[in-house]
Image (cartoon, rainbow, N blue to C red):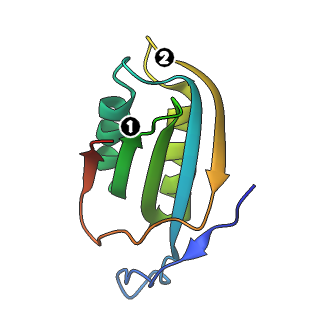
Amino acid sequence: MAEDYPAEPVSEPKDQACLKVLVRAYRVTGRVQGVGFRWFTSRAAKGLGISGTVQNHPDGSVRVHARGALAVLDQLEATIARGPMAARVEAVERVGPPQTIKAEGFRIERA
């Protein structure tokens, strides 16, 4: 499993410590194309406040690049492992190193 890659810290209110912001990349395999997987992932990531991208790849997998605090990245990983109802996720593999991720927003990219 690939390691997490550090990004710059996010400042929280003075009574809380700085949260460590990480970058992760995932390769998701199974029946994950043509079943709403990218939309499902985008909606989950936006709900968690994660920045990044999701994209279909020619080999039939889906790649997810995500930037956020450790706790929310763990939540996203668990969510994409379940996938939408029509999907059949066989594996969620952490890969690296991920691409550079813009600081704001999550978007679906075309293959």
Q: Which amino acid, mark 1?
A: Thr
Question: Around disc 1, counting alpha carbons within 10 Å, would you say few (fewer than 14), some (14 to 19), or many (20 or more)?
Answer: many
Can residue 40 be seen here? yes
Q: Position of residue 60 (x, y in %)?
A: 51, 29
Can residue 50 be seen here? no
Q: CA distance from mark 2 to mark 1?
A: 12 Å
Residue 22 to residue 8: above or below? above
Say which residue label 1 marks: 41
* Mark positioned earlier in the residue sequence (2 or 1): 1
Numbered tag placed on residue 57 in the rendering: none
The image quarter in which residue 65 lies = bottom left
* Residue at the bottom extreme, as displayed: 14
* Residue at the top extreme, as displayed: 86
* Residue at the front extreme, as displayed: 58
Say which residue label 2 marks: 87
Q: Is residue 109 left or right of residue 73?
A: left
Q: Position of residue 32 (x, y in %)?
A: 48, 24
Q: Position of residue 74 (x, y in %)?
A: 57, 51
Residue 68 to residue 47: above or below? below
The image quarter in which residue 108 lies = top left
Q: Which amino acid, mark 2?
A: Ala
Question: Around disc 2, counting alpha carbons within 10 Å, would you say few (fewer than 14), some (14 to 19), or many (20 or more)?
Answer: some
Q: What's the residue at 24%, 59% (across, down)?
A: 105
